Amino acid sequence: MPVNYATPAADQLFPVAGVRLGVAEAEIRKKNRRDLTLVALDAGCTVAGVFTQNRFCAAPVQLCRNHLAAGKEIRALVVNTGIANAGTGEPGRQAAQATCEAVGELLGVAADQVLPFSTGVILELLPVERIKAGLPAVFADLKADNWHAAAHGIMTTDTVAKATSRTLAVNGKKVTISGVSKGAGMIKPNMATMLGFLATDAGIAQPLLEALVKEAADASFNCITVDGDTSTNDSFVMIASGQSGARFAAETDAGWAEVKAAIIAVSVELAQAIVRDGEGATKFITVAVEGGKDVEECRKVGYAIGHSPLVKTAFFASDPNLGRILAAVGYAGITDLDVDGVKVWLDDVLVAEKGGRAAAYKEEDGAGVMAQAEITVRVDLGRGAAQASVYTCDFSYDYVKINADYRS
Amino acid sequence: MPVNYATPAADQLFPVAGVRLGVAEAEIRKKNRRDLTLVALDAGCTVAGVFTQNRFCAAPVQLCRNHLAAGKEIRALVVNTGIANAGTGEPGRQAAQATCEAVGELLGVAADQVLPFSTGVILELLPVERIKAGLPAVFADLKADNWHAAAHGIMTTDTVAKATSRTLAVNGKKVTISGVSKGAGMIKPNMATMLGFLATDAGIAQPLLEALVKEAADASFNCITVDGDTSTNDSFVMIASGQSGARFAAETDAGWAEVKAAIIAVSVELAQAIVRDGEGATKFITVAVEGGKDVEECRKVGYAIGHSPLVKTAFFASDPNLGRILAAVGYAGITDLDVDGVKVWLDDVLVAEKGGRAAAYKEEDGAGVMAQAEITVRVDLGRGAAQASVYTCDFSYDYVKINADYRS
């Protein structure tokens, strides 16, 4: 059960002109499962992405990087679930290449105009023949109002499909933004991967889009943690078709600030949906760190708190165990931190200052906050003006159950 | 139930000439519990220690650092359980100081010749009056053959007392080394702390002892992880009384290599005992990383594997989930790692090479190793001659239970 999250209805997910989606069952690893998704792009789209920093990155991630770097117009994305095609060496690269070639033939474009994505079991080779056999059905299913199906098509052990849409009026044009994501951990048990795809009918020049995808990822997918494990397949791709007629080439363009804010908001919503559906999650935690010398040290503190199994089990127990939070602040790696200047709040309750428990703090106030399904831990480091937030979930019996039982 | 560990019998823990220990019940937090331990040192001992790097370090840790830096001869260690005296600000420092003064009066030495240690609940003030009231009983209990009682006196939620002794003949003298440790996590639920104390009747000059305690800590307590949380109170102290007649002042002294090796071996045994008694542990895991460019990157990989909740739950499930181990190697932070050169073994079974699963690997061979209570994960990074090991345990339902239920 995700924390305060439900998949929007199909008619709440708006088509993005220039983008068509198709889904089919290709029996890649199991029967009766929508496991192959194709996103076909009209000519004229710009596309940019960010990918996992894991050195054991999957074969499709390597091809995505190469194809984007080659600079040809991207015309399709193909996503399979079931097999991650990670830890598969040279045969894995060939399988991903063959997938791109098959999609290219179907759509009449070159293989390096296709971006491949895989999610599922690591260390097993992609069954390219089944993907090829499934492609005609996916092709036949292509349509613009198919975001709901695509959100389901990229799921693995997610308990809900994750998608969102919004529209805004900019410069006299109606701009639509739609996106889907999947994942219930930074890495899933044996099923690797976080994936995020976002499309807009705004036109966004390639350099501006590349800057935006990095900025949006830093504000969204790069701020979430379920278990601290970085997947081999993480990918976040942004598509701008331009078919709304609203076009942007520079940060200073009229209306760009609004479009950018909306795209970042959609990215954050898609990323947070992954945490809300985190393995075994019963609570959604925002760790908001402020007063740092730079963003980097704020993120260190946010992740120290967000990764600590002791803090996360305390959230599960609704226990305002302040010592665990202070200890995590203390070992986050700021070697010259003056702990007497640190303040910590649970929501609006000041719980710690001057190196210890706040004088006015009452345990029942902390307990009241901890009992909620959504909690903000606010930390003021008291040494600067930088800030950063990290989103995480609690750590429950079910986390161990899901991860210990997965392959048995 | 610790993994392959039992407390030695009292007569297997040998007295160290020059060192007397006393234990008593002082009702610091609970009744009927040995919670106060005093270690009295004859004149002529050298003492050195290493302490937590946590910025929220406890008041007693701050005093230990100050007293060791002041350079007077250390004549006593006093340890209380129940209250960690961490996150207590200035009042906490005064409480630790008052404890040292009371011990100093009792033994006729100055307050800064006393090292204080506390372990227990964070954010609560030390009840100095109860410690003062308990000191006469501890003083009356002082004796050389009291290591077994001292091992029990420093326990908090440990399920077993942890101690070891060994003797060796060096330069015609019989040298004894005895030590105790406590802790079941790098930080305990609300009960902070890892503590380690080791004494020998070898004489070790202060500079040599200071180098040794760092080297021994790096090979032992700094290589263990239960949950990745660094405590506010971690302390490891080494005492050398010299009363065996064997004395050492330089690395090149005859017999020093043997004594040093024995002291490091005792340190490793004490540290590993903490992991064997790790919260909820059912397995003891050695992560041995070799072929690194430097020790630092080997440790990064060791800790990435040793901290990963996904890897640790796989150990709990006896599941040879290689993808999780490879993913951890990949995100450990070696940005120029060539994954095709990495090899991974479970004990002697080669499981991964050339970027993926080893050709000859059979799942049942991996499963056989994973079913054991003691497992070595060996990783060859294939890029140098450095190596490092990390010791950890698995991650079970009981870990969540212990940490989620602790205060409720």
Image (cartoon, coloured by chain):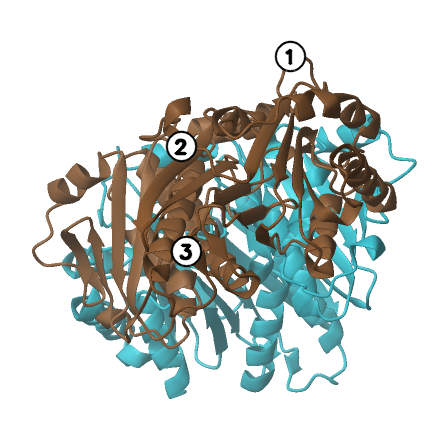
Chain colours: A cyan, B brown
Q: Is mark 2 on a helix, strand or loop?
A: loop
Q: Mark 1 points at which residue?
A: B32
Asked whether disc 3 touches disc 2, contact meaning CB atoms under 8 Å apart, the reply is: no
- Of marks 3 and 2, which one's residue comes earlier in the chain? 3
**Amino acid on which the number 3 mark rests in the picture:** Ala
Q: Name the residue under label 2.
A: B281
* Residue visible at 39% across and 45% down in the picture: B266
Instruction: Using the image as rendered, state which of residue B324 and residue B16 is in the foreground.
Output: B16
**Amino acid on which the number 1 mark rests in the picture:** Asn
**Amino acid on which the number 2 mark rests in the picture:** Ala
Task: Classify residue B314 by image quadrant.
Answer: top left
Q: Is mark 1 on a helix, strand or loop?
A: loop
- Of marks 3 and 1, which one's residue comes earlier in the chain? 1
Instruction: Using the image as rendered, state which of residue B5 and residue A40 is in the foreground.
Output: B5
Q: Is mark 3 on a helix, strand or loop?
A: helix
Can you give x and y, in whole percent of width and height, for residue B341 in the image? 23, 71
Q: Mark 3 points at which residue?
A: B219
